[in-house]
Structures are given as C-alpha cells and as structure tokens.
Amino acid sequence: MASDHALKRLTLVAVGARLISNGESYHVWKINKEKRERLANFGRYTAECLPKFIQKVQFAAGDELELLIHPTGVIPVISFLKGNHSAQFTNLIFICGVDVPTRKNRFEVIYSLLSTRFNARVRVRTYTDEVAPIDSITSIFRGANWSVFNFKHNIKSNLEELFSHHPLAFQKLKLWCTPFYLGNYGKM
C-alpha cells in the first residue's frame, strides 16, 4: 500500500500552481509565429548591415534568434545589437562557452542578449582556438566582467588567453577562488 502511494507521487509533476499526472497532456512552449517572423526579418536586416561579420542566421529553441559570427566581429556585432534603434538588446544575460576538442576552432563562445523593449532574445555565437583571443565586450557591457570571471573558473581553468583587452587581471582572479569570508578578496 505504501509503495502504491509513493509510485503515485512519482507520476505527478508540478506545473505552475497545480499538479498534473503523466496521463494529462499540456503544451509547455508555444511558438509565437508573428514574433518569430519579426525576428527572422531582423536577422536578415542585421546580416545585410554587417555582412563582413555575420556568417549565418538561424533559430534556436523555437523562437530565439541565433547569429553565428566571425571572431573579429564580436565588438561590432554586439555594439550594433545594443545601440541600433531597431534592436535595443541592452541586457547581457550570460556568456558561456563550449569546448569541443575535436574541432579545429575548439572553443565556442555564446553571448545571450535580451531586448526588454521588444521582448526578444538573441544568441551570438563565435569560435576560437587556443591561440587567437576574442575581444572582450566589457567596453559595451560592464557585466561581462563578472561573466568572464565565471566562464574562466567554471568552464576551463586555462582560458587566460581566450579574451583580449579584458580589464580583469587573470592572475588576481586566482585569489577569488577561496571563499570571501576568509578575506582574500581584499588582498588584490
């Protein structure tokens, strides 16, 4: 009897404020076709404005625009997305990275931006290898400073050469690995 109750609890899934069983059907993600079409038009517009840097425009996660760019285009593309009146992607959500050792350009860096004005997200993806650094976007988004700190320590410990023109001294970041309550953050 107790095992039946435990099994019944395992088949229930919390969705919002109510519980549903596995037998119920629900739709988690509804793609807004109008929004997707607007983003597709914006992606084409961006590719026309910056043909030297944007290599491919595609969609990820249904209706999230994704721009694949050349590594030299990080600063111009991010500046365009933040400053252009028809874009206004003024919030940096995160910077993350992927290490695929089998690729020639093994590191992929992904910037996620949000436009609160147009309620839209865009991912900007670029690539690099162990030798060629990517320009830091801290001159555009000050929050990129903290994102790169997390990126460096959580993804790969030897990424000191991955970003150029970055204001943080990576030697000093090693002090931040120990807990703050030890007082090491004040010794920089």
Image: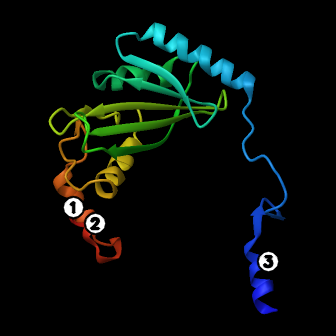
How many C-alpha atoms fall within 10 Å of the one at disc 3: few (<14), some, or many (≥20)?
few
> Which residue was labeled with disc 1?
174
Image quarter (top left, top right, bottom left or bottom right) of the N terminus? bottom right
Snapshot quadrant of residue 29: top right
> Which residue was labeled with disc 2?
177
Q: Nearer the viewer, residue 73 or 185?
A: 73
Tell me the element at label 3.
helix
User: What residue type is disc 3 on?
Assistant: Lys
Q: Residue at x 67, y 32 (%)?
A: 119
The circle drawn on residue 8 is 3
Q: Residue at x 19, y 47 (%)?
A: 160
Q: Are marks 1 and 2 in contact (CB under 8 Å)?
A: yes
Foreground disc of the pair 2, 3: 3
Image quarter (top left, top right, bottom left or bottom right) of the C terminus? bottom left
User: What residue type is disc 1 on?
Assistant: Lys
Q: Are marks 2 and 3 in contact (CB under 8 Å)?
A: no
Residue 49 placed where, x, y %? 46, 8
Q: Are marks 1 and 3 in contact (CB under 8 Å)?
A: no
User: What residue type is disc 2 on?
Assistant: Cys
Q: Is residue 104 left or right of residue 47?
A: left
